[in-house]
Amino acid sequence: MAPIPRGFDGEAARRHLARRDRALGAWMRRIGPLEHDFSRPLHPVDALARAILYQQLSGKAAATIVGRVERAMGAKRFDAQAIARLDDDALRGCGVSRNKIAALRDLAAKAIEGVVPTPRRLACMADAEIVEHLVQVRGIGRWTVEMMLMFRLGRPDVLPVHDLGVRKGAQVVRGLDAPPAPRDLEALGECWGPYRTLASFYLWKIADAAQQTTVPTPRSQE
């Protein structure tokens, strides 16, 4: 199977969304074009290891721990062999919790088993197939994989219905009293396909604007 192209035509996506959803289109004109670079190489084990280490921590604290682990590994990229070289005491000394150590060990094992696809194989897989493979890794849920699909692989039609920021953005666009439930958001988002990824990018911006957030909320994999 040929690799699936990364990214999508942003202008075509904006026109489609504005035509299909006038309320969203008005917000899009207010915010302006959003540009994303999908060209960075993606190494699944590295991306997932970082996602695990960042869970439930502030960005600054997580970055400090990641830096310590990189120095302990003697490498800037996580892979199964690099993780295996560090024993549990070394990882704990870097500030990694027991649960995250177990998740890193499982990630390395799943990579060796072939559950975690290689970059070349990943590029040829459908979104649902990628989710099915990667959620088998301890500590990796659907949301984390969706962020990878959106920000790193540039897949055009991903709607993370459980993301609170996306739900809050939809609440603003639709003038709702509360964020829509995931099932309701999925129904609302049908008109945004096949560009639900760009719709999600705008919904995050809309949620930040509505809360008058001056610093954009960081997203995993961004």
Image (spheres, rainbow, N blue to C red):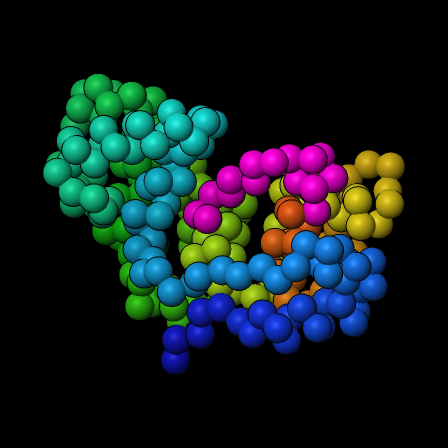
Please tell me whether residue 219 belongs to the stretch shown in magenta: yes
Q: Which residues are magenta?
A: 206-222
102 or 93: nearer the eye?
A: 93
Q: Nearer the viewer, residue 55 or 88?
A: 55
- Magenta stretch, main secondary structure, is loop
Q: Which quadrant of the rendered structure holds the N terminus?
A: bottom left
Percent coordinates x, y for residue 106 in the rendering: 31, 39
Residue 180 picture location, percent across and down: 78, 43
Say which residue appears at 43% left-offset and 63% top-offset.
38
Q: Is residue 87 left or right of residue 194?
A: left
Work out whether residue 189 can be spotted: no
Q: Residue at x 40, y 71 (%)?
A: 124
Q: Nearer the viewer, residue 44 or 84?
A: 44
Residue shown at the point (64%, 67%) measured from the top left: 195
Residue 208 lies left or right of residue 63; in this view the side is right
Q: Nearer the viewer, residue 132 or 202?
A: 202
To which quarter of the image does residue 123 belong? bottom left
Name the quadrant containing residue 71.
top left
Place of residue 81 in the rendered image (x, y in percent of width and height, measured from the top left): 16, 45
Q: Is residue 103 above or below residue 117?
A: above
The picture places residue 12, in percent across and down from the top left corner, at 63, 75
- Taking the magenta stretch, the answer to whether it contains residue 87 is no
